[in-house]
Image (cartoon, coloured by chain):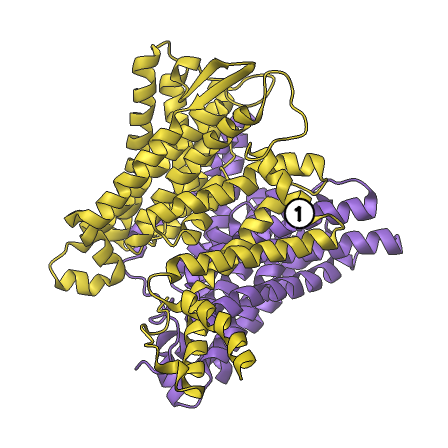
Chain colours: A purple, B yellow
């Protein structure tokens, strides 16, 4: 039971922070299919930082993970500029731009990982090995009956995610910027009439999305396999999209959706182990989150309402 | 004055070429290709490689230019046949993407549909001992049916339950990848290669062992299927009521509904057809080119086909040319990386850059249009030329 909670939470939280990124972008009216590429690129920049630091400074102190998270955030933000430029400035179709970013991210990161690896270590592998991340228990809370598992063996980044998520919730729902951003996704022309700058709002929303995705991607790189390689593109960015649709584009309900995915995934895996099936069968249990997503969407997407202006290119002259 | 005019001539022609309704569908992709090759050349130069030799080795790897030396029984023609073998699924897959896009849908699940149809065909026909005349058509039919069923499922969920087709197809991609991976690992795995066992030659969509002089040739049947499909799709979209309805739904859903077109039915039909071609791509890929399936590996060709159809202006005939171009990069990259020494992932980088520029196509056209308007405004004599269209509305 504890293992299900520990693994579920460490999967759900990175997914959640990526989904928040998606919410920012979509609530501002920009379709965001690029989460997968953004999280991967962020993880790539973060992992590169770690590898370079380790090679040239020689040590790998425990706070290196924070540096990695910081650079992953910056990297994701940097890469999201492409999506922002394409969608806002160049008026490309937003779904297509998302796919462009994903394809470019996979290609560029694989390409540069082998180049950088060859330059630093002389070994042209396409994989960065990271150190195992430090984990800790929360002293008192872990003895809570039943829910105690949520406070055991936490990663440092889970704490970071919780803090960032609260900040992001505040920014979206309680500030002027957040109000403008949400207006931008519902009725951009009213924002324009009120003196706001639609393009600027969308641009910043996409940058925030990139930053959060990069952060989430780095967390995945640490928690799942402690490395960065082309297999880091496991499609969790897409799962985050499903999560935010399932969560009806709201941050609190998206958290529930992500927790659901996380626990479905970890309990499926534990179920497989407890039934004593061979490792081949774990594949069948791994489809659980995806099947459940589809099933739940069948029941819930009727009530779902996407931001009204999502996917529309803002044209000032059109009213 | 005359020198001034001479300088202006080609510039204006260029803008007109970009902005004219007739030439722009060719001009914009051409410009995108030129720009991408330029960017790729700069990248190669930065890495200290000669771009001309690098691009030549791409062509050599595809049998479009002679290599300096060949192994026994091989030659430019065998390379070319192998190139055509991988070109066929690329063309078919991009047809699938095109039909969906013409209807305003986005089939990002081509890779999954390919894998599923390839797997079912392999499991049902590939390991049976049916004769070639029964097995080959059966493989094609299975590909079409399985792919079509998956596509129709996606379309149905969109139409009936309002689930975004991108989400459905991505979920299906992962489900298919894990489920087929499970079956291959459990029942069909080759113990040495960890891939599925090689299929029987009777069920392959390739004719092997043709002796042509000193060469041992094989001929991919998929390429015939691919070219036939291009013209079938072109006919469907341009000459039939169904095609007109599909395109009407793609242009404006509400308007189509108002005109009495059944939007839901047409969306399902479009995804069904899209799936059919993705399925055909799957069987030509797994049972024509590779003969085996790597478990839990979605073909990157499925995603490249999106780039192909965008570059080809979502036009069936245009996709022939863009398929050839992108396949040259993808297929030639193996030979290129072994001779020039650049990681073969550069092919995907080039594809990505190509896609990046083609996504900006509407903006390029808009710039060209604005450029022409400016010129027209500044020089009334030269500006008598009619300016035909509004801004690109993508």
Sort mark 1 into few (<14), some (14-19) or many (20+) by Cα contacts within 10 Å.
few
Asked if A309 appears above or below A4 in the picture, the reply is: below
Q: Residue B155's spot in the image, x, y percent?
A: 28, 47
In the rendered view, does A194 fall on the left or right side of A144?
A: left
What is the chain identity of the residue bearing mark 1?
A: B
Seen from this angle, which residue lies furthest left? B260
Using the rendered image of the protein, determine whether residue B52 is visible from the camera's viewpoint. yes
Towards the viewer: B141 or B219: B219
Q: Residue A315's spot in the image, x, y percent?
A: 37, 78
Using the rendered image of the protein, determine whether residue A34 is visible from the camera's viewpoint. no
Q: Quadrant of the C terminus of chain B?
A: bottom left
Residue drawn at point x = 29 percent, y = 26 percent: B141
Q: Residue A240's spot in the image, x, y percent?
A: 48, 55
In the rendered view, does A217 fall on the left or right side of A116?
A: left
Residue drawn at point x = 67 percent, y = 49 percent: B51
Q: Which residue is mark 1?
A: B52
Towards the viewer: A160 or A76: A76
Residue drawn at point x = 47 percent, y = 67 percent: B14
Residue drawn at point x = 32 percent, y = 80 percent: A318
């Amino acid at each position: 039971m504890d293992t299900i909670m520990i693994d579920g939470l460490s999967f759900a939280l990175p997914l959640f922070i990526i989904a928040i990124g998606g919410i920012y972008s979509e609530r501002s009216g920009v379709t965001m299919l690029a989460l997968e590429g953004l999280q991967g690129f962020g993880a790539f920049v973060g992992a590169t930082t770690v590898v370079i630091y380790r090679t040239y400074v020689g040590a790998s102190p425990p706070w290196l993970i924070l540096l990695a998270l910081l650079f992953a955030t910056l990297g994701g933000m940097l890469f999201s500029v492409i999506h922002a430029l394409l969608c806002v400035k160049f008026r490309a179709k937003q779904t297509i731009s998302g796919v462009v970013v994903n394809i470019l991210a996979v290609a560029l990161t694989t390409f540069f990982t082998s180049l950088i690896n060859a330059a630093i270590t002389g070994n042209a592998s396409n994989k960065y090995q990271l150190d195992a991340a430090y984990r800790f228990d929360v002293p008192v809370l872990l003895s809570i009956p039943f829910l105690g598992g949520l406070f055991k063996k936490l990663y440092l980044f889970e704490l970071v995610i919780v803090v960032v998520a609260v900040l992001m919730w505040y920014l979206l729902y309680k500030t002027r910027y957040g109000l403008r951003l949400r207006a931008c996704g519902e009725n951009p022309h009213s924002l324009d009439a009120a003196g706001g700058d639609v393009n600027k709002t969308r641009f910043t929303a996409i940058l925030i999305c990139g930053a959060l995705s990069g952060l989430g991607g780095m967390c995945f790189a640490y928690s799942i396999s402690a490395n960065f390689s082309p297999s880091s593109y496991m499609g969790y960015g897409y799962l985050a999209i499903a999560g935010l649709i399932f969560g009806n584009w709201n941050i609190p309900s998206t958290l529930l959706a992500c927790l659901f995915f996380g626990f479905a995934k970890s309990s499926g895996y534990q179920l497989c182990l407890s039934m004593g099936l061979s490792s081949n069968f774990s594949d069948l249990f791994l489809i659980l989150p995806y099947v459940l997503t589809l099933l739940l969407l069948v029941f819930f997407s009727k009530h779902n309402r996407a931001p009204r202006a999502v996917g529309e290119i803002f044209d000032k002259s059109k009213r | 004055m005359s020198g001034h005019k001479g300088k202006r001539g080609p510039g204006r022609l260029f803008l007109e070429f970009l902005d004219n309704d007739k030439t722009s569908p060719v001009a914009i992709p051409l410009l995108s290709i030129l720009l991408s090759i330029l960017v790729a050349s700069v990248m190669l130069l930065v890495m200290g490689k000669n771009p001309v030799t690098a691009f030549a080795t791409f062509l050599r790897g595809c049998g479009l230019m002679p290599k300096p030396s060949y192994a026994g029984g091989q030659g430019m023609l065998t390379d070319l046949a192998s190139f055509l073998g991988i070109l066929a699924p690329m063309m078919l897959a991009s047809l699938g993407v095109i039909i969906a896009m013409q209807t305003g849908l986005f089939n990002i699940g081509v890779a999954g549909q390919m894998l599923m149809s390839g797997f079912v065909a392999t499991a049902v026909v590939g390991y049976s001992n049916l004769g070639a005349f029964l097995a080959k058509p059966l493989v094609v039919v299975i590909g079409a049916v399985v792919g079509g069923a998956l596509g129709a499922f996606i379309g149905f969920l969109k139409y009936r339950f309002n689930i975004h087709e991108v989400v459905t197809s991505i979920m299906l991609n992962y489900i298919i990848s894990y489920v087929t991976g499970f079956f291959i690992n459990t029942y069909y795995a080759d113990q040495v290669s960890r891939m599925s066992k090689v299929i029987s030659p009777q069920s392959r969509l390739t004719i092997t062992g043709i002796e042509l002089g000193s060469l041992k040739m094989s001929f991919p049947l998929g390429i015939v299927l691919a070219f036939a499909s291009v013209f079938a799709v072109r006919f469907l979209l341009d000459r039939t009521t169904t095609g007109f309805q599909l395109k009407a739904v793609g242009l404006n859903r509400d308007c189509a509904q108002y005109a009495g077109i059944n939007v839901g039915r047409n969306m399902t039909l479009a995804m069904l057809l899209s799936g059919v071609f993705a399925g055909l791509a799957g069987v030509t890929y797994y049972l024509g080119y590779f003969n085996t399936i790597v478990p839990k590996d979605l073909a990157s060709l499925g995603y490249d086909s999106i780039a192909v159809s965008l570059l080809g202006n979502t036009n069936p005939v245009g996709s022939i040319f863009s398929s050839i171009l992108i396949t040259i990069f993808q297929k030639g990259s193996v030979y290129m990386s072994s001779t020039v020494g650049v990681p073969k992932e550069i092919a995907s980088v080039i594809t990505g850059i190509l896609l990046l520029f083609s996504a900006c196509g509407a903006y390029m056209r808009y710039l060209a249009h604005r450029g022409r308007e400016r010129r027209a405004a500044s020089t009334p004599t030269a500006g008598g030329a009619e300016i035909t269209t509004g801004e690109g509305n993508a």
